[in-house]
Image: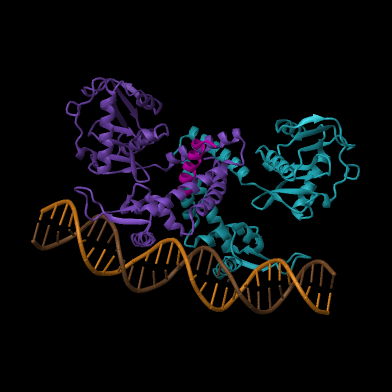
Chain colours: A purple, B cyan, C brown, D orange
DNA sequence: CATGAAGCCTGACTTTAGTCAGCGATATGG
DNA sequence: CCATATCGCTGACTAAAGTCAGGCTTCATG
C-alpha cells in the first residue's frame, strides 16, 4: 500500500477527528457530563432497550446503569419493563419523559447548529463540494468498517440474512421463488468442516452473508451470497466472495463453483469481474440459468 | 441553508468522529493514559517548548505539568531549560529520551497501522476515491476552521503577515516593491476608531490579514489583504474582504475602495467577483494600476 | 421444577481528567 | 532597581469515567 495514501489518511484522521470530534463533544455537552448527553441522545424520542444502548455506546453494564439513574434523577428518562406482549421480562426499556424530549430536541438543535457552523464560512459552490466529499468519505468508511466472519447458520442474524436473501430472490426471479423446489441447503453443510457460513456485520448489525459447501472430491460450492441494499456498491459482495474462496483454498480445495439466476445481473457481473468463468450446468437447480467456476491458487 | 446539506454534515460527523475518532484514540493509547500518549506524540522527536504544547493540546498548566512529570518518571521525556543563547530562562523544553523516541516510533507505527486498516478492505479504485474525498474534506474543513478577528497592527502575528505580504508583493510586482515609495500606512490608522486590522488564524497560527482605513468624508479604504499560500483557494480572501466591508458598513460608511497592481490577477478577479467595479485613480500610489470601488448596503 | 444463563442492578472501588490558588524564578518597562 | 507580568511548578481539590464482584429477577431447557 503506497505511503502516499497512508499519509493522506493520517492527515485526515488527525485534522478531522481531533478537531471536529472535540468540537462535536463540546456542542453535545450542555451543563451535563458528556456520557449522559450521549446516552440521552442515543435513547432518542422512540426509546431504546438498555442492552441496545450498552452495545451501541460500548459501555459497562454498571456504568450505563448509573448513567440511567442520573438521567432518571433529573426527570429526563424513565426506565421500565419491556411492556410488549410476550416480551422478555428481563430486558428494560428507557424512554424519554417530556423534559427528556425537550432536552433531546435541544441537542438536536445544537447538532444542527454545529453542522451549520461548518458550512457557514464557505461559499455555495464550496459547500456543495464539501458535502459531496463528506458523503463519499462516509460511504467508503462505512464499507471499511464492515466485518466479515464465520457465524453458525442457526444464529438469528444469519437466519435474518437468509430470509432477506430469499425475499429478494422471490422478488427478482421470474415467477418468484419457492425454497421447496430449489436444491436444499442444510445447516450442517455450512458448519465446519463441511463448509462455512460467513456473516457481514456493520456495527454488529447483519448486512450480508455468504456460504460455501466443501463437497468431497468436487469443487466447493458457493451459496447465498447476499448484501443488504443499504451497503451495495461498496465492494462488500466482492469481499465476501474472496473470503469464501480463501476458506475453500485454505482447506485444500482448488476450485469453487456456483449457480445463479439470469435476473441477478450485478451478481453475474461481479462473478465475471472476480475471475469466474461460465461452465456447463453441474446441477439441476431449477432456478439457475448460469453456472460459474473459478480455479483457486493453492 | 438547505436542510439536506446540514443532514449530510451531521451524518458525516456522526460516522467519522464517533467511529474513526474513537478507534484512533484506542490506537493511540498503549498501556498509557490517552492524554500522556497524545502529549508524547506532540513532543515529537524534535522536542517542543512547554508553552507550545500547552496551547497545541489546550491543556491547563497544572495538568500539563503533571503529565510531563509522569512521562519523566517513566523515563520517556526530559524537561530542561531552553539552552539557546539569549533564550528566555523561564521557558522550558521537553525532549524525548531514547526510550521516549522508541515509544514515539511505536505510536507512529500504530498510526500507520490504523490508516492501513481503513484502506485495507477497499479495492484499489475505491481507495483512491476515499483518499481524494478525504483530502477534499480536510481542505474545506480547514477553511471553515479559520477564524478572522481584529488584532492590533503591532502584534507580532500581524507584523509577520504584513512582512509576508511585502515579500510576496516584492516578488510579483514588476521591478520589485519598495515600501518607502508606496503610500504609507501608519499603525494608528488601523486601530479603531480610525480603522481596523483583521487577522485570519488557523489553530492560532496567522494565515492571512486585511485592513481598512475609515477616511473622514470619503469611502473607506481596504489595504493589505493577504492570504498564506497554504490556504489559498479556500475562499479565505473573500471572507476577509467581506469582514472588512462589514466593519466599514457597521460604522456608517457606504462605500469602500482599494488600489491594486496589475500582476495580482487572482486578487483582481476576486474583487470583481465580490462586486467591485473599476474606477478612476483616486490616489497617486505608484505601484497601482487598477482602482476599485464597491457600494455597501447600509 | 431444578439449573444455569442472561439482563439489569448496586456497592465499592481506581484511574483519568481537569480546576484553581499560590509560589519561586525570570523577564521587562519605567 | 522596583513593580509587574510571565512561565512553569506544586498542593489540594472535584468531577467524570470506568472496573469488578456480587445479587436479584426472569427466561430457557432438560
> Residue B245 at what x, y percent from top left?
73, 41
Name the image quarter holding the C terminus of chain A. top left
Residue found at x 48% / y 34%: B126
Residue found at x 57% / y 65%: B76
Say if B113 sits above or below A174 in the image. Answer: below
Residues in magenta, as a range: B1-19
Residue B79 makes an appearance in the image = yes
Whether residue A39 sits left or right of residue A49 in the image: it is right
Residue A221 makes an appearance in the image = no
Say if B243 sits above or below A259 in the image. Answer: below
Whether residue A297 sits left or right of residue A258 in the image: it is right
Secondary structure mostly taken by the magenta-highlighted segment of the chain: helix
| Residue B226 forms part of the magenta stretch | no
> Residue A216 at what x, y percent from top left?
22, 34
Picture quarter containing residue B247? top right
The tally of labels here is 0
> Residue B168 at what x, y percent from top left?
79, 41
| Residue B7 forms part of the magenta stretch | yes
Picture quarter containing residue A156? top left
> Residue B277 at what x, y percent from top left?
77, 30
Q: Nearer the viewer, residue A84 or A61?
A: A84
Amino acid at each position: 500500500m503506497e505511503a502516499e495514501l497512508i499519509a493522506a489518511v493520517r492527515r485526515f484522521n488527525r485534522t478531522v477527528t481531533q478537531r471536529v470530534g472535540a468540537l462535536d463533544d463540546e456542542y453535545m455537552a450542555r451543563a451535563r457530563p458528556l456520557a449522559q448527553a450521549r446516552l440521552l441522545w442515543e435513547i432518542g424520542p422512540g426509546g431504546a432497550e438498555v442492552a441496545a444502548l450498552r452495545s451501541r455506546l460500548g459501555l459497562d453494564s454498571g456504568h450505563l446503569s448509573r448513567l440511567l439513574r442520573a438521567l432518571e434523577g433529573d426527570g429526563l428518562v424513565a426506565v421500565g419493563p419491556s411492556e410488549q406482549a410476550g416480551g422478555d421480562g428481563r430486558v428494560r426499556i428507557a424512554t424519554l419523559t417530556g423534559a427528556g424530549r425537550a432536552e433531546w430536541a435541544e441537542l438536536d438543535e445544537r447538532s444542527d447548529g454545529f453542522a451549520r457552523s461548518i458550512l457557514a464560512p464557505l461559499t455555495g459552490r464550496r459547500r456543495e463540494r464539501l458535502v459531496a466529499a463528506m458523503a463519499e468519505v462516509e460511504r467508503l468508511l462505512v464499507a471499511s468498517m464492515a466485518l466479515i466472519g464465520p457465524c453458525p447458520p442457526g444464529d438469528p442474524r444469519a437466519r435474518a440474512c437468509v430470509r432477506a436473501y430469499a425475499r429478494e430472490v422471490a422478488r427478482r426471479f421470474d415467477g418468484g421463488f419457492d425454497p421447496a423446489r430449489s436444491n436444499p441447503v442444510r445447516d450442517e453443510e455450512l458448519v465446519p468442516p463441511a463448509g462455512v457460513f460467513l456473516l457481514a456485520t456493520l456495527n454488529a448489525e447483519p448486512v450480508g452473508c455468504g456460504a460455501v459447501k466443501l463437497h468431497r472430491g468436487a469443487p466447493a460450492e458457493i451459496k447465498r451470497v447476499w448484501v443488504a441494499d443499504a451497503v451495495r456498491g461498496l465492494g462488500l459482495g466482492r469481499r465476501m466472495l474472496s473470503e469464501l474462496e480463501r476458506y475453500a483454498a485454505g482447506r485444500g480445495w482448488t476450485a469453487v463453483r456456483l449457480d445463479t439466476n439470469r435476473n441477478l445481473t450485478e451478481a453475474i457481473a461481479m462473478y465475471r469481474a472476480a475471475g469466474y468463468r461460465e461452465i456447463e450446468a453441474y446441477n439441476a437447480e431449477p432456478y439457475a440459468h448460469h453456472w460459474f467456476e473459478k480455479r483457486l491458487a493453492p
